[in-house]
Each structure stands twice: as structure tokens, then as C-alpha cells.
Image (tube, helix red, strand yellow):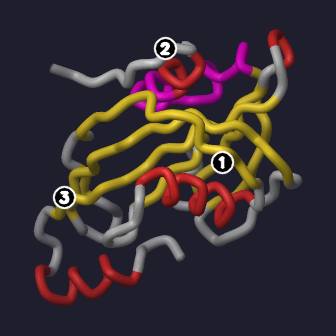
């Protein structure tokens, strides 16, 4: 479901007012060395390629939400290895006029099982992208930064101060 039910209920009360929403990005990697690949989805709403992203449910543990989003969108099972970045995005106005700002928690994840496929209506396509091609595939700087943080091997999460 593109818009979580709790957001639909909130929108009934607050209309299109700006909401502050917790979200996750799951950067899923498989392979080793030069053969590493990153799982990307092509969004159905705007056609852009991105890592797997999604809104957390109320009370949901962020790592659990990241794993859930990957499974729901791609049919792939992952281990959530570590938090790699946190960021507050710029205010967004969606096509329907709803406004939101997302607090993103980006996780490095490792593929465990499953063939990647479009598993819901949020994505038009799913693919494994060689790490060397990720910067070309992703046209949003924030997504490139999140993937770079996950691939860096750094143990501390990146954040803006």
C-alpha cells in the first residue's frame, strides 16, 4: 500500500498540513568485492530508481521496518546490519498536495534469500545494480549519499551537525 493506513487516518484530521514522518532506507547489498550489487526499485509514482524506502508504522522498531519494507516491496529477505546515516529531508509536496518532512534512518542490509521482483504496487521494476553503476542509476543526491554511507564500511552513523 503506497500510503500507510495511519497516515490516511491522520490526513482525514489534518488535511494536507505538513507531517513529520519517520522513514527508513534499506541499502541491500549482495556479493563480494567487485561483484557487489545494490538492490534498487523503480518507483511507480515518479519512475525514479531508489534504494528501498518506506514509512515506519507507529511504534515499529526501525530495523524491523527496514526488513519489512524490503520484503514487502521486493520479496527479498535481508539481515539489517547497522544504522549508517540519519537525515531530515527537505519539505515535500506530493502530487496529491499532501505535505511532509521525513526523518530518514538508513540501514546497511545484506541479502539473505529470495529472488528480487516487484512485490507490491509501489514499484514498477526491481533490479540488482552493480556498485560501480549506482551513481548513474540514482538521480537524487540524497539517495546516492545513503548508498555511499552503507557501502563505506564505516561503523559510525553519518549525520549532519
Q: Which mark is residue 41?
A: 1
Q: Residue 78 location in percent, x, y? A: 70, 48
Residue nearest the viewer, comparing 41 with 36: 36
Sequence-earlier tag: 2 or 3: 3
Residue visible at 57% across and 30% down? 138
Sequence-earlier tag: 1 or 3: 3
The quarter of the rendered structure image containing the C terminus is top left
Sequence-earlier tag: 1 or 2: 1
Quick one: SS at disc 1?
strand
Q: Which residues are magenta?
A: 131-146
The image shows residue 97, relative to residue 86, as above or below, that is: below
Q: Main secondary structure of the magenta part?
A: helix
Q: Nearer the viewer, mark 1 or mark 2?
A: 2
Q: Nearer the viewer, mark 1 or mark 3?
A: 3
Q: Residue 1 location in percent, x, y? A: 53, 76
Quick one: SS at disc 3?
strand
Residue neighbourhood size for the residue with mark 3, other residues' Cα within 10 Å, grouped as few (<14), some (14–19), many (≥20): few
Q: Is 138 included in the stretch rendered in magenta?
A: yes
The image shows residue 38, relative to residue 154, as above or below, that is: below
Tag 3 residue: 20
Q: Which mark is residue 154?
A: 2
Residue 30 is drawn in which quadrant?
top right
Q: Residue 38 location in percent, x, y? A: 70, 31
Residue nearest the viewer, comparing 131 with 113: 113
The image shows residue 82, relative to residue 149, as above or below, that is: below
Indicate left or right for 150 with 58 as reference. Answer: right
Q: Residue 7 location in percent, x, y? A: 30, 77
Amino acid at each position: 500500500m503506497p500510503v500507510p493506513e495511519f497516515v490516511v487516518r491522520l490526513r482525514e484530521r489534518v488535511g494536507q498540513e505538513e507531517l513529520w514522518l519517520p522513514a527508513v532506507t534499506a541499502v541491500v547489498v549482495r556479493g563480494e568485492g567487485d561483484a557487489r550489487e545494490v538492490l534498487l526499485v523503480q518507483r511507480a509514482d515518479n519512475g525514479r530508481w531508489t534504494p528501498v524506502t518506506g514509512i515506519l508504522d507507529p511504534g515499529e522498531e526501525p530495523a524491523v521496518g527496514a526488513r519489512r519494507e524490503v520484503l514487502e516491496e521486493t520479496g527479498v529477505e535481508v539481515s539489517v546490519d547497522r544504522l549508517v546515516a540519519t537525515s531530515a529531508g527537505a519539505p515535500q509536496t506530493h502530487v496529491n498536495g499532501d505535505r511532509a518532512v521525513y526523518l530518514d534512518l538508513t540501514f546497511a542490509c545484506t541479502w539473505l534469500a529470495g529472488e528480487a521482483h516487484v512485490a507490491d504496487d509501489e514499484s514498477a521494476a526491481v533490479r540488482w545494480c552493480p556498485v560501480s553503476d549506482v551513481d548513474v542509476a540514482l538521480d537524487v543526491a540524497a539517495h546516492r549519499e545513503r548508498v555511499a554511507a552503507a557501502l563505506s564500511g564505516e561503523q559510525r552513523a553519518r549525520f549532519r551537525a
